[in-house]
Image (tube, grey):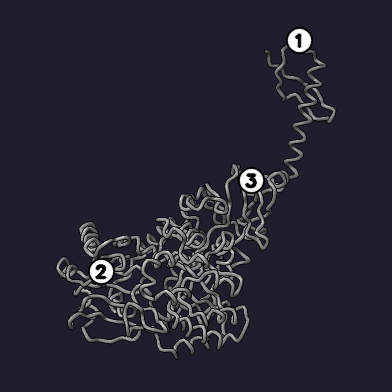
Amino acid sequence: MNVEVISCTSTFNIPCSLFIILFPSQTVTLVDQITTMRKYLFIALLIILTSCGKNKADTIIHNAVVYTIDSAFSVAEAIAVKDGKIIAVGESEDILAKYTAPETIDAKGAAVYPGFIDAHAHFVGYGSSLFQVDLFGTNTWEEAVARVKAFAEKHPDLPWIQGRGWDQNRWPGKTYPTNELLNRLFPDKPVVLKRIDGHASIANQKAMDMAGIKAGQTIVGGAIETKNGKLTGVLIDNADDKVYAQIPGPTKEIYVQWLQAAQKNCFEQGLTTITDCGLNYRDVEAIDTLQKTGKLAMRLFVMLSDDNENLEKYLKKGPYKTDKLFVNGFKVYADGALGSRGACLLQPYSDKPGWQGFLLRNKSHYDSLAQVLAGTSFQMCTHAIGDSANREILKVYNKYLKGKNDKRWRIEHAQIINQNDFNLFGSASIVPSVQPTHATSDMYWAEERLGKERLKGGYAYKQLLKQNGWIPLGTDFPVEDISPFKTFLAAVVRKDAKGFPDDGFQKENALTRAETIKGMTIWAAKAGFLEKEIGSLEIGKKADFILLDKDLMKVAETDILNVKVSATYLGGKKVQ
């Protein structure tokens, strides 16, 4: 074979002298060469002309199963992205014919979903917890203390030892511990360990001395546990505030480490937007700066904590919004948690006669705050666990919302509802913001707290969904695991990671797969007035999406927790 350079002019009057064609010179005539040349040139021109006529995109994902989560729950094959937004959704052939992009990805049949949105979590708190003693999963108090000791030995320079995640309901006897072991091991260093739900702590004597806590003290919305007149170290709800007030705040460098570590874990799970429930305005300012300087990419919907500083600063200026940050709610606390018996019940606890829990503030506080917020654009978002707390807040909301509306005031958790009160959600368009893994975590002991009949109104997600026709889902991390796949399992199958129980927990309140996906995407966005920007893969929306190695809409129930995130895109950029 010889290489011959042919100099000619095609029928299109385009010089061909630079084209190199391989011909067997012994058998191919010049006429044959010119004829073949014209054929190749025609094909080349078609390619050039077709390419020139295409619209430019930054990224194309094709040959995929794209769950758009639009109003029809449409399924497409491809999407095109430009400048951080979705510019086309459709069939692969059409998208590839109309668009060209430097990043064109053949998904090879993989499932593509909008980025997951956690409708209730604690992003900053989670980041902080990653640098504390991990007490999740401990089976005895002694095991928890051993972890504290090991952590302290690795971090001798820390002025305080903090930890989180212990749960006495997992331990023999299911009773609160005392701080005797902590006092013996740490006589001169303050130690405080948060319970798994964040509504109780155990502190050593040094920490309580620094906080001025003494036996016999009383506090509104809290309880200081004693035994034979002596402090045990257990502080429930508002009672531990004085201890945490003594802990120095983090340096800027450490704060950045917290948030970047939290962000990394979120992206790995396919989470692209987090609702952080209960921040101080100083946190908001720090987060805003980190986002604007490119040190933090995560999108955040923020609820400010219900305190005078936050109210004074934001009621005057109103909601605050950037491309990645939206401050539009106030997080209010009605009661504590069921696990620590701080949830406020209409009737006494089944396993603690005479005790009904308590509200964390006087009833007048919720009424007056609702009256103020009703005249603003802010959402009132109230933590309510017990049936009494839920009833109280539902009544207050209904008083000021006055029927159907679009203010999207929320009840966070909406965990135990009296059967006579479910209708109070729908009557004032109140949004129940729930966390399905709470059901599968609490199911082991919830009946002991409530009794069988009262439990029927607990973790009733299907019943709550029917009130407004939509329901946002979250995890409440770090109270529960960060995994949205565990959320999916708990909502659809009503089982925990162990596959318990065999028939599912109160399966009548399971959600469908489609409802659960919506709860983790478009409905979670809607809960924060963000549904026009994120939550679905539609033209004009931000290109937040994920690729999964298995399809959540089709995967076997037993394989849900094996689903992995192959890639996470935020604003059209790959972040994981």
The label on residue 62 is 3
Q: Badge 2, how many Cα within 10 Å: few under 14, some, many 20+? A: few
Amino acid type at circle 1 is Thr
- On the image, the x and y values in percent for residue 505 come to 45, 64
Query: Mark 3 or mark 2, which has the lower sequence index?
Result: 3
- Which quadrant of the rendered structure holds the N terminus? top right
- On the image, the x and y values in percent for residue 393 come to 49, 83
In percent of the image, x 17 and y 68: which residue is there?
181
- Which residue is more in the foreground, 558 or 470? 558
Amino acid type at circle 2 is Gly
Q: Of circles 3 and 2, which is in front?
A: 2
**Real-space Cα separation, disc 1 to disc 2, in angstroms:** 95 Å
Q: Badge 3, how many Cα within 10 Å: few under 14, some, many 20+? A: many
Query: Mark 1 or mark 2, which has the lower sequence index?
Result: 1
Give the image quarter of residue 184.
bottom left
- Which residue is more in the foreground, 250 or 74? 74
Q: In this view, does 497 lie to the left or right of 182?
A: right
What residue does disc 2 label?
Answer: 173
What residue does disc 1 label?
Answer: 27
The answer to whether residue 287 of the structure is visible from this angle is yes
Image height check: is 507 above or below 557? below
